[in-house]
Amino acid sequence: MKKLFLLIFLVGSLSIALNAENNDSTKVKSNTENNASTKAKENAENNESVKAKRAEKQIQEQMKREEKYAKEQTFYQGKDFDLSELEVDPNTLESIPDIEPDYSFNMDDVYD
């Protein structure tokens, strides 16, 4: 009787210990995955905001130039015009989505 009681006690405690160990490892894995996905989302949002700020800054600079030209209302000759102001930062172009071509376009549909 004592042997049966000890055997049941050992099997029960062993199953409880294994179950508790599995639960702890599952929690650690899920926390690690959640932390990794949260960090990835934050990094993506930060990158997006940096790109948006950079694009907004360049738009503001161009608007200031346009206001200047509108105020002066003069046309510059090639030697007077500084094209280095109008150069576009290549890093900004990466954030602009590509437009997919419409290969199914037919000119005959336009004239119908």
Image: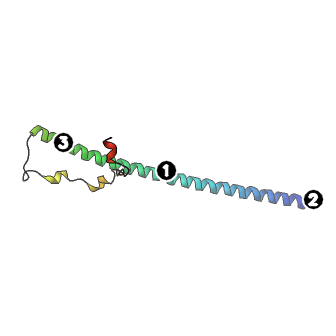
In the current view of this chain or complex, which residue is farthest to the right?
1
Question: Which quadrant, please, contains the C terminus?
Answer: top left
Q: Nearer the viewer, mark 2 or mark 3?
A: 3
Q: Which mark is residue 64?
A: 3
Could you classify mark 1 by the number of other residues whose Cα lies within 10 Å: few (under 14), some (14-19), or many (20 or more)? few
Mark pair 1, 3: CA separation: 39 Å
| Res 4 → quadrant | bottom right
Q: Are marks 1 and 2 in contact (CB under 8 Å)?
A: no
Mark pair 1, 2: CA separation: 55 Å
Asked whether, in this view, residue 23 is left or right of residue 106, the answer is: right
Q: Is residue 104 above or below residue 11?
A: above
Residue drawn at x 17%, y 42% is 66
Q: Position of residue 22 (x, y in %)?
A: 67, 57
Could you classify mark 3 by the number of other residues whose Cα lies within 10 Å: few (under 14), some (14-19), or many (20 or more)? few
Residue drawn at x 8%, y 52% is 78
Q: Position of residue 19 (x, y in %)?
A: 71, 56
Q: Which mark is residue 38?
A: 1
Q: Position of residue 31 (x, y in %)?
A: 56, 52
Residue drawn at x 73%, y 57% is 17
Query: Of marks 1 and 3, which one's residue comes earlier in the chain?
Result: 1
Q: Are marks 1 and 3 in contact (CB under 8 Å)?
A: no
Give the secondary structure at mark 1: helix
Residue located beneath label 2 in the image: 1
Give the secondary structure at mark 2: loop
Of residue 37 and residue 107, the one placed in the foreground of this image is: 107
Question: Which quadrant, please, contains the N terminus?
Answer: bottom right
Give the amino acid type for the residue marked by disc 2 in the picture.
Answer: Met
